[in-house]
Amino acid sequence: MTVQTWTYILVGITFTLYIGIAIWSRAGSTKEFYVAGGGVSPLANGMATAADWMSAASFISMAGIIAFAGYDGSVYLMGWTGGYVLLALLLAPYLRKFGKFTVPDFIGDRYYSKTARIVAVICALIVSFTYVAGQMRGVGLVFSRFLEVDIDTGVIIGMIIVLFYAVLGGMKGITYTQVAQYCVLIFAFMVPAIFISIQMTGNPIPQLGMGSTLNDGSGVYLLDKLDGLSTELGFTEYTNGSKSMTDVFMITLALMVGTAGLPHVIVRFFTVKRVKDARKSAGWALLLIAILYTTAPAVSVFARTNLIDTVSNQEYSKMPEWFKTWEKTKLISFDDKNGDGRIQYVADATKNELTVDRDIMVLANPEIAKLPAWVIALVAAGALAAALSTAAGLLLVISSSVSHDLIKKVFNPNISDKGELMAARLSAVVAVVIAGYFGINPPGFVAAVVALAFGLAAASFFPAIVLGIFYKKMNKEGAIAGMVIGISLMLFYMLKFKFGIFDGGKTIVASLQKDWWFGISPEGFGSVAMLVNFAVSILIMQFTPAPPKNVQEIVEDIRIPSGAGEAVDH
Amino acid sequence: MSDKQQKATAYWKENVRYLFMLLIIWFVVSYGAGILFKDALDTFQIGGFKLGFWFAQQGSIYVFVVLIFVYVRLMNKLDKKYGYNE
C-alpha cells in the first residue's frame, strides 16, 4: 500500500475515534463544559494536559529547530518542561483549592476588582489567539503534504473536526479526546524514533542511542561524528551554541515562566477532584511530556546526521524519492550555484545550495531513513493529533473567557446556566472561524507571534498569580499596575525589535540587534518584563491600601489543601 | 492567634521550606549545569555525551520529573502530619 492510502486509513480511524468520544462525553451543564464536572482522575488529566500542551510546535517543529540549532535548541527543551515544576509547586494546588473555572476568575476575585478581571481576560485572549492560529496552520501543512489536498481545504477540514468536539463536548469532550490524542501522538513520535535509533546506533532507546557509538563498526560516537561534520561544513559545533549565555538563560526563563502562565494549561488543573490530585496530575503530565521531550533531541541528532550524509556533496540527479516529493511543497530547494550538479550544503550563504525548512525534519525523517509506508502515515496522524488537541484546549479558554468572564461576570450576571452554556458554544464557533481565517491567511508572523505568547504570559499572569498566593498583602492596585506595565513593556520590545515598527519595518530588524537591552533577544525579554511586573506590583502596593479582610482570608484558605470541594460558581 | 491559625501558619512555613529546597535543585540542574557551568562540565564525558550538553538536553528534564513526584510525596506526608489530608 502507498503512503497516501495508509494516511487515509490511519487519519480516518483516529478522526472517527475522536468524534465518537465527543458524542459519548458531551457536556450538559456549564460545569461540565468549563471543567469537565471536576471529577477527572489524575492520570487522565495528566494525559490530557500533555496532549493539550504538546502542540504542532512540539511535535513537528521542535526537533527540526534543534536539529539546526544544536545546543541552542536546549532553551526549548528545558524551558517547556521546567515550567511544569513551577506550575506544580507554585500554582496548580492553590488554584485548584481556589476552585473556580478560569484564570481571570482567580485574578478578578483575588484582586477584588472588575478591572483586574478584564485585564486578565484581554491577556488570555491575546495569548490564546496567537497560539491557536499556529495550530491551524500545522493542520493545513500536514493535510497538504500527506493527503495532497490544498492547504486551505486542510485547514477547513481541521476546523470542522475541532468545532464538532469542542462545541459539543466542552471541557469534558476535550479531556477524553485529548487522552486518546496523547496515545496517538506519543506512539507516532516514538515508533520512527526507535526504528531510526536501531538503524543508526543499534540501541532501541533513542535517549541512549543519541549518546552511543555508530552502528557501522567505526566505534565513533554519533555526537562526535555530527560535531565533526558540522565543523567541516562551516557550521557551529553541534554541541556548542552560538547564542550568548545571557540570552540562552533569559530565553529559557521566559519559556519556563510563560509555560506556567499559559491559561489553557492552568485551567486543566481545575478539572481534578482534590488538591493532592492536582499535584499528582502535574507530575503525570510532565512525565508523559518528558517521554517526547527527551526523545526529540535524539531525533534531531539522527535527522541532522542523516540529512548531511544523504545530501552533502551528492549528485542532485541521484537524490532519493523523498527529496523530490518535498521539493514540490517548496519546503526544500536546491539551487546549483556552481553548476557542478552536486549539492553543496555549507554554512557560507554565498556557496550554500540547499535550503531546508526546519519544519519538515520530523515529517520527512521516516522517509529519509527509508522506513515503511505505515510509519510515515502514522507520523501524519500523530501531527494532526498534536495540533488538534492543542487547538481545542485553546478554543475552550477563548470561549470560556467570553461566556463566563465577560458575559456572566461583567455584562449579564443574571444569565441562566442554559443561556451561559449557549453563549459558551456560540463563542467557541466564532473562535474557530477566526482561528481558521488566520490559518488560511496567516499573518506572515505566526511563528514570531507564538514566541510572543510566552513572553506575554510570563509578563502578565505569572507574577499576578504567584503574588496572589504567596503575598497576602498584595492588593489590586499593585497587581493591575504590574500586569499592565509588564505586558505593555513586552509588547513594546517585541514590536520594536521583532517587527521594527518604530524604525522602518521588518527588513531592518537584524540591524537593530546591537541595540538589544543587555543583549537580550525579544524571545528572552519576557523574563525582564516579568521581573519588572514583580517590582512594580510590590512598589505600588507600598503606597496603596491593603486588601480587605475577606480577601486575606481567601488567601489563607487556598494555602490549606483540605476541603477543596468541587469547582463551584458563586 | 488561635490554634487553628497557628497550625495553618506552621504548615505554610514547612511548605515554603520544601519549595525553596526543590526550586534550588530545579535551578542548579537547568540554569547551573545546563547553561552557566555548561562549558566546565563539557570537559567530562559519559558515553558519547559531554556532561553539560547532556544536562541541557536530557538530564535536567529527568530531574524535573523526579522533583515533582518528590514534591507530591513530601506534601502528602505534610498534609497527614497536620491533618489536612482527605
Image (tube, rainbow, N blue to C red):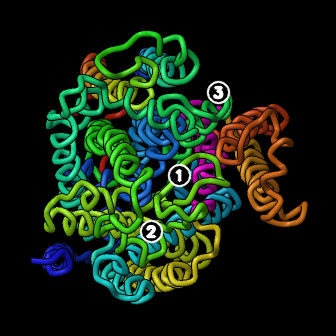
Co-location on one chain, circles 2 and 3:
yes
Q: Which residue range is magenta in the image? A: A447-473
Chain label for disc 1:
A
Can you say whether A454 is above or below A26 in the image? above
Q: Quadrant of residue A126?
A: bottom right
Q: Vertical placement of A533 versus A319: above or below?
A: above
Disc nearest the viewer among 2 and 3: 3
Mark 1: which amino acid? Phe
Q: Disc 2 marks which residue?
A: A135
Q: Residue at x 61, y 39 (%)?
A: A251
Q: Chain of mark 3?
A: A
Between the residue at mark 2 and the residue at mark 3, the CA separation in whole angstroms equals: 31 Å
For residue A245, the mark is: 3
- Amino acid beneath label 3: Met
Left or right: residue A435 versus residue A284 is right
Would you place residue A356 above or below residue A313 in this image? below
Q: Which mark identifies residue B11?
A: none
Query: Mark 1 sits on what residue?
Result: A106
